[in-house]
């Protein structure tokens, strides 16, 4: 587009907002880790050149032209559609919850090269698993990994209040595990088993390759997912509607 600055980059579509009758505003995570928002003109028009290329979760090679308030999508090449997520409610819900957290974790103008590959791998992990307990595990792992990277790493080795290693509670508000004595002073502290604490630690240590084949009970996976929701809602101070939907199904 003559006279306008352009930028070519890779990006994952996190969110889509309707604009006018046929356009969309895309919220994307770029491969530099920045949030990028751009108008995809005609993207809602059947048969339009962007219609099949800017679905949620798609990884794209895009050319953006600088606009007055938002960038304009000039070109889009589909790199990875994550097609097997679509048509499966549980997988769509899990991927939507992950992208919701990703959108809250990236900032326009702030680069962080860790974010794009982590999100891409988490979406691929959702495609690789075939049951809800592993979907729960993948979402929980993504939440704790990305928030730990950004400074909200839970303390799980000793009581965050007194240092005691006899841990029986977990508190997102306090920032990690608690002994029974200190937990009585913390509102909302959750009683946990040694197995549940071990799994919380494993979410940070294990790779997605290991997590997608890990043996885990459904109730433990659900505990981890619920804990992840409370953790991200507490520390990012946000209501996560897609995450709430995932927990409801």
Image (cartoon, helix red, strand yellow):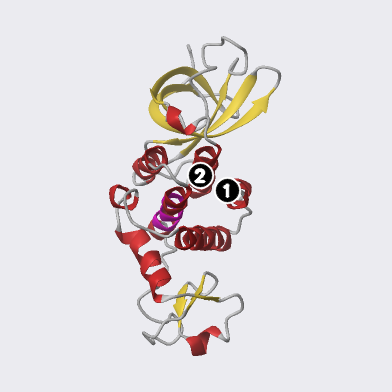
Please tell me whether residue 169 belongs to the stretch shown in magenta. no
Circle 1 residues within 10 Å: few <14, some 14–19, many ≥20: many
Judge from the rendering whether residue 178 lies leftward or rightward of residue 236; answer left or right.
left
Q: In this view, does 11 lie above or below 249?
A: above
Residue 20 in picture, x, y percent from top left: 70, 21
Please name the residue shown 49% across and 87% down the image: 180
The residue shown at (48%, 13%) is 1
Report the front residue among 81 and 219. 219
Q: Does the magenta stretch include residue 142?
A: yes
Q: Do the residues labelled 2 and 1 touch (CB within 8 Å)?
A: yes
Based on the displayed image, in which of its 4 quarters is residue 89 positioned? top right
Residue 58 picture quarter: top left
In the depicted structure, whether residue 8 falls above or below residue 144: above
Tell me, for residue 246, which label it has, or none. 1
SS for dot 1: helix
Residue at image x 53%, y 48%?
104
The numbered dot on residue 94 is 2
Question: Over which residues does the magenta segment extend?
Answer: 138-145
Q: How many labels does the image show?
A: 2
Q: Residue furthest bottom?
A: 181
From the viewer's perspective, tell me whether residue 54 is left or right of residue 197.
right
Q: Give the x, y percent position of residue 192.
A: 48, 75
The overriding secondary structure of the stretch rendered in magenta is helix
Judged from this view, the residue extending furthest toward the top is: 47
Q: Nearer the viewer, residue 132 or 31?
A: 132
């Amino acid at each position: 587009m003559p006279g306008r600055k352009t930028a070519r980059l890779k990006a994952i579509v996190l969110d889509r907002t309707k604009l006018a009758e046929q356009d969309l505003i895309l919220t994307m995570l770029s491969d530099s880790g920045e949030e990028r928002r751009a108008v995809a003109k005609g993207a809602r028009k059947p048969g339009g050149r962007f219609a099949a290329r800017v679905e949620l979760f798609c990884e794209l090679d895009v050319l953006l032209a600088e606009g007055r308030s938002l960038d304009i999508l000039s070109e889009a090449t589909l790199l990875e559609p994550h097609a097997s997520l679509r048509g499966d409610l549980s997988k769509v819900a899990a991927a939507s919850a992950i992208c919701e957290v990703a959108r809250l974790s990236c900032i326009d103008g702030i680069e962080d090269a860790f974010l794009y590959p982590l999100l891409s791998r988490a979406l691929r992990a959702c495609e690789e698993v075939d049951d809800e307990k592993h979907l729960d595990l993948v979402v929980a792992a993504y939440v704790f990994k990305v928030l730990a990277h950004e400074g909200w790493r839970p303390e799980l080795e000793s009581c965050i209040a007194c240092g005691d290693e006899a841990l029986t509670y977990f508190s997102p508000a306090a920032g990690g595990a608690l002994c029974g004595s200190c937990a009585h002073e913390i509102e909302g502290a959750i009683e946990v088993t040694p197995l549940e604490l071990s799994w919380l630690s494993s979410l940070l240590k294990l790779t997605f390759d290991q997590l997608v084949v890990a043996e885990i009970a459904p109730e433990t996976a659900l505990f981890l997912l619920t804990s992840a929701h409370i953790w991200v809602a507490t520390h990012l101070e946000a209501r996560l509607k897609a995450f709430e939907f995932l927990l409801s199904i």
